[in-house]
Amino acid sequence: VQLQASGGGLVQAGGSLRLSCAASLRTFSGWVMGWFRQAPGKEREFVAEIFGSSGYTNYADSVLGRFTASRDRAKNTGYLQMNSLKPEDTAVYYCAARETSSRDWGYWGQGTQVTVSS
């Protein structure tokens, strides 16, 4: 499985960005797409995930209510809509994929930089 993330950039605090992650999957069914981020000097952390079949989502407390994960099954693409961005959201964002039956995020895309200025 190959994942291609895009959509990062520079935005002012309070602004919005949408990240995309195109997956080389025949179908999203049976897969979960996740979003992670890593800020300078910090460990990579979980941001959100979306189950491909049901659309069920989970979010880190730090982004709940501001970020929304979605997917387009026809395009095998996942999205992370990020609103009300804060400087502390600055990080390299990664998309990842795992099979629904696995806890192991076995597939990772390249990172995309998100910078939020104050």
Image (cartoon, helix red, strand yellow):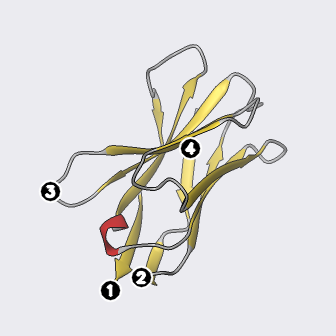
Q: Residue at x 55, y 75 (%)?
A: 16
Which residue has dot 1 on it? Answer: 118
Q: Earlier in the sequence, mark 2 or mark 3?
A: 2
For marks 1 and 3 on the same chain, the one whose residue lies earlier in the sequence: 3
Q: Position of residue 97 (x, y in %)?
A: 54, 33
Q: Residue furthest left?
A: 41
The residue that mark 2 highlights is: 13
**Above or below, 82 relative to 118:** above
User: Residue 41, which numbered label?
Assistant: 3
In this rendering, which labeled residue sits more in front, label 1 or label 3? 1
Asked if labels 2 and 4 touch by Cβ distance under 8 angstroms, the answer is: no
Question: Is 46 left, or right, of 42 in this rendering?
Answer: right
Mark 2 lies on a secondary structure that is loop
The span from disc 3 to disc 4 (Cα, nearest Å) is 25 Å
Contact (Cβ within 8 Å) of mark 2 with mark 1:
yes
Residue 3 - label: 4
* Residues at marks 4 and 2, CA–CA distance in whole angstroms: 28 Å
Which amino acid, mark 2? Ala
Considering only order in the chain, which callout, 4 or 3, is on the residue closer to the N terminus?
4
Locate residue 117 relative to residue 39 in the image: left or right: right
Residue 62's x, y, as percent?
39, 54
Measured from the top left, where is residue 10 in percent x and y?
43, 81
